[in-house]
Amino acid sequence: MTAVRCVDLCKTYIQGDTEIKALDHLSIDIDAGGFVCLSSPSGGGKTTLLNAIGGLDIPDSGEVWIEGERIDTKSKGELAELRLHRIGFVFQAYNLIPVLTARENVEFVMQVQGVSAEDRAARAMAVLQEVGLTGLEDRRPAQMSGGQQQRVAVARAVVSRPTLVLADEPTANLDSKTSDDLMDLFSELNATHNTTFVIATHDRRVMAHVPRLIKMLDGRIVDDIQQHAS
């Protein structure tokens, strides 16, 4: 099954008098259960592509399909529902809610989904254990290291059991050991739950870690490499 299909995507931004082609007739297929890295220099289009796949940004033209369903023609409300139930996001800045504990941050998405308090608590505790945060459930973000906060963000992204996780520069604020640990965690979640991962990064350590590396330049795919992940 194809988890993500992009067909002839174009997206142009205007900066002053300059026209920037963030996506230039780009097409790509990603299989369900895939573990893929998008790599490009700054401004090469990887984040724009990630945002198009997640319905955060609508392309100027072309088609975006998630699990056989076209999403680029959906309304904002329909896209919000899609993201709520089927797509998990991991951002460079973590985007945790400062006044909530780790457990409460993880529970937040399920609360919006209408999951019962009992089920929320059980699932949050289970996924926090899965990401190695047992004993830190009641700490707020300011009481945690960057790596621990990123693990909370990962737990929040996967607790709602999405079929697709999109991660934008997830290791940018982490040291090499924590980055390796995070990628090991992604690999484990991918293998255990068959969750599709698409990661945008310029971190060479991340690129070496994935089975499929897609290199982009000026909004186009210039290389699509199958490799043995380290």
Image (cartoon, rainbow, N blue to C red):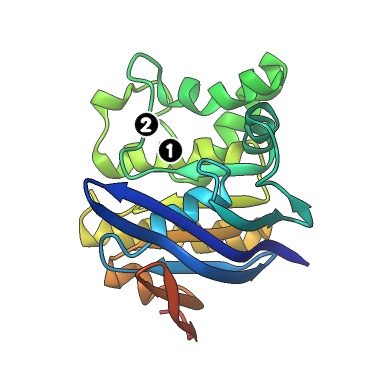
* Residue lying at 31% horizontally and 56% vertically, measured from the top left: 19
* Residue lying at 25% horizontally and 25% vertically, measured from the top left: 143
The amino acid type, in three-letter code, at marker 2 is: Asn
Residue 87 seen anywhere in this rendered image of the structure: yes
Which residue position is annotated with label 2?
95
Between circles 1 and 2, the one closer to the viewer is 2
Q: Position of residue 54 (x, y in %)?
A: 56, 46
Which corner quadrant of the image does residue 86 belong to?
A: top right
Callout 1: SS: helix
Q: Position of residue 185 (x, y in %)?
A: 46, 57
Compare residues 93 and 129 and report the one nearer the observer.
93
Binning the other alpha carbons within 10 Å of mark 1 as few (below 14), some (14 to 19) or many (20 upward) gives many
Of marks 1 and 2, which one's residue comes earlier in the chain? 2
The amino acid type, in three-letter code, at marker 1 is: Ala
Which corner quadrant of the image does residue 169 belong to?
A: bottom left
The reply, left or right, for residue 68 in relation to residue 164 is right
Which residue position is annotated with label 1?
153
The N terminus lies in quadrant: bottom right
Q: Can you say whether 207 is above or below 76 in the image?
A: below
Callout 2: SS: loop
The C terminus lies in quadrant: bottom left
Cα gap from disc 1 to disc 2, whole angstroms: 8 Å
Residues tagged 1 and 2 counted as in contact (Cβ below 8 A) = yes
